[in-house]
Amino acid sequence: MNFKLKKSILFSLFILILSVGCKEVSTLNEIKVSNIEELNNAIKDAKAGDNIVLSNGVWKDVEITFIGEGTEDKPITIKAETPGEVFIEGVSNLAISGNYLKVDGLFFRNGHAPTTNVIAFRTSEKNVANNCTVSNCVILDFNNLERDQDNLWVQFYGKHNKLEHCYLAGKTNGGPTVRVDLKGNQSIRNYHQIVNNHFGPRPRKGGARGETIQLGSSFTSMSPSNTTIANNLFEECNGEVEIISSKTNFNLIKNNVFYKSEGSVVTRHGNYVTIDGNYFIGDGVNEQYGGIRIINTGHWVINNLFYKLKGKNFRSPLAIMNGIPKSPLNRYNQVTDVVVAYNTYVDSNSPWQFGVGTNISQSDVLPKSEIRSARPLRTEVVNNVIYNSVGDANPIIEHDKADGVTFASNIIHNNGVDFSKRDGLTPAELTLTNIGSDISAPISGFDDVEIYNGFDFETITKDLLGKSRSESNQIGAILNSGNINLDVLDKTKYGASWYSDAVEAKEAATHTVSNSAQLVAKLKEANSGDIIELNDVLFKISEPLIINKTITIQSKGKAEIQYVGAANTPALALHPYGKLTLKNIKLKGTNTQFAFASLKENMSNHFGLEVIDSEISNFDYALKVYKQSFAEEITFKNTSISDCLNGIELSEETNDKGDYNTEYLTISNCNFNNVKANVIDYYRGGYDESTIGGNLVIKNSTFTNCGAKEKNKMLLNHRGIVNVNITGNTFKNNSVKFVSILWGAKNNLQSNNTIVNSGQIKVEENLAMKLMY
């Protein structure tokens, strides 16, 4: 065959192959749709390999039911025309069932779901999804209108489904952000994957049911789930004490980063969870940033780094709980056969706590079935490294005896501070090495420590960074393997590729106003973060001022706002997202209205209030917060509240399920005079340990002639609030029996108070409260 002929044949073959390839591409069925009717028709007619493309724009009030039968090689896909430019808004949701389906690039915002989930991997009880994927999507602030309207943002059913490269943030109502459900054989041994996502800030909920991820429930806790949660960033996930709540068996929680999150990874129910190679990163200050809390049997906690965590008890770096003997499914089973090995703890206070949750001292107010007295058994804490820049006199805390725990081959650098010696925890001199991401950890100086080899330890083949332990193993999470440069806080590694939660800092604008009309107009026009500056004149207001963004209202002197609106309406109405700072203002009513109040309903997001250097007088309520409203912080500082029928009321969460209306209530250098009832009324009911439990600080303040119409004859009502500090105050001529009743078993404290003709401060060690379970 001559060269030219051979070349011609090869060229013809190339063209043939290219044409076949082009034909394959040309047969790809891409269907572009512009409304829900077109989408429904496209889904109904879809075949394996089809791509349904949603046109850019707002899709409002759409309930998408995606049913189809794709294949592994040819899935059916619903995707955005441009990722991040297809907005699912209003009353909308997505339900998926069938096989090999994919959803990509959608943005859920400005709305809420009509059902108990935003995205569900099923379309009915029997029709579930298998081998389906939701990726590159965002769900942001897609909250129900009421805090008690629980729902889920992503709910897994079926098997082998995946949530990947998504961003989810801002859930404020009850219910986990993501839950894996195992009801029915079609959802057991599911092997779901929750991977490479960015779980952005979840604000404190002020009650239970605020987990970021929940795997199963109490009543499916005997079932194997085999779910993997890996390579995710959890940032400021503060909903409650459990960031991840594992309630099933054989789950894997691996290579995640928990950054400044007020909670822990918790093996709440179920057994045999592996928690391997995770980063728990605090700031060395916040006492709510937690690590891992262990309940039940057979868990392995290996290769984790705990960095600058200051959490205590339930939120300690490692909390191993006491259980309830013969516990029912929904309570606390005894810890047995747990391995805690090859972990590193850096500047984390009292990192090992045992017998957490023991409540034997409360046996006089709790039924026997609630007493947590079963100590951990057959638990090994071995091959770990502790480093303390500031020495810790109590690296191990035993709330109950840790006599069922074996300690071996652990070392501690304690900066010369003595601690209670224990076999298996040996002092050592170590140094820190910068390993990137503003993290330093000890990685050398202990290669001579004899490694404890327990049963099955040969299966621990890698360290935190994925380096092999086979050749030069050592204790701790990180092998000494040369230069290390972590980038675990690089947000581009997680979540949707098209979305960034970075907010450009803007300089606050100041708007100066001289009359009421200008005040109302500028308040509407101002951007979030702006300042409204009042000239020193009288502002007479007849309608509530709407606070629905972050705003400061202030004056250089002390301008007066006189509210003459209708009875039972607020001068300043605190709406969702409304965060108000009021500074140097006289605020006066006509005795029938409220100075500040939340909405009675539809408080779909949090509010905030700070009152500084101001005078509040002649109102029915100084502050009225309604049920299902929540503020992370409420502060009154250098302020007087006088001649009001009621003071600061946050007491409508009376369902006794652990809910309350604010996380932090601070009263500092204030004067209360002639406030007749509810002077400070801040309530949390029910035995619940899922939250911080509320914080009340009353300091350096004066209460005079208050409480005359208080029905329970108590000046400061704070029943059920966990953290209370009443210090440096003066109580004079208040016609009450008690200034306060403190909960002795909790963190309720008082000091340096002066009481004149005002009853007494009493300590009640154990409050009888309603059981939630």
Image (cartoon, rainbow, N blue to C red):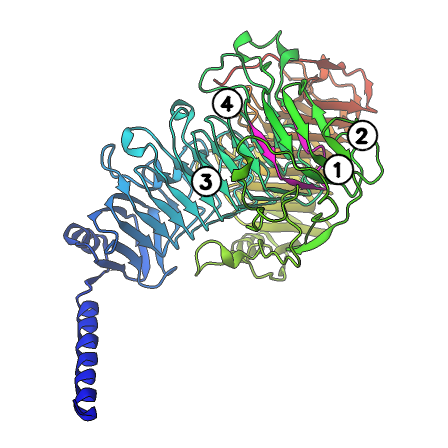
Q: Quadrant of the N terminus?
A: bottom left
Look at the image and give the residue range highlighted in magenta: 338-354
State yes or no: discs 1 and 2 in contact (Cβ < 8 Å): yes
In the rendered structure, find residue 412 and report the number of the disc placed on it: 1
Mark 4 highlights which residue?
A: 657
Residues at marks 1 and 3, CA–CA distance in whole angstroms: 47 Å
Q: Is residue 345 magenta?
A: yes
Which one is in front in this view, the residue at disc 3 or the one at disc 2? 2
Disc 3 residue crowd, few under 14, some 14–19, many 20+, Cα 10 Å: many
Mark 2: which secondary structure? loop
Mark 2 highlights which residue?
A: 419
**Residue 532 in which image quadrant:** bottom right
Mark 1: which secondary structure? strand
> Of the residues under marks 1 and 2, which one precedes in the sequence?
1
Which one is in front in this view, the residue at disc 1 or the one at disc 4? 1
Query: Could you tell me the amino acid type at mark 4?
Result: Lys
Mark 3 highlights which residue?
A: 604
The answer to whether 341 is drawn above or below residue 468 in the figure is above
> Of the residues under marks 1 and 4, which one precedes in the sequence?
1
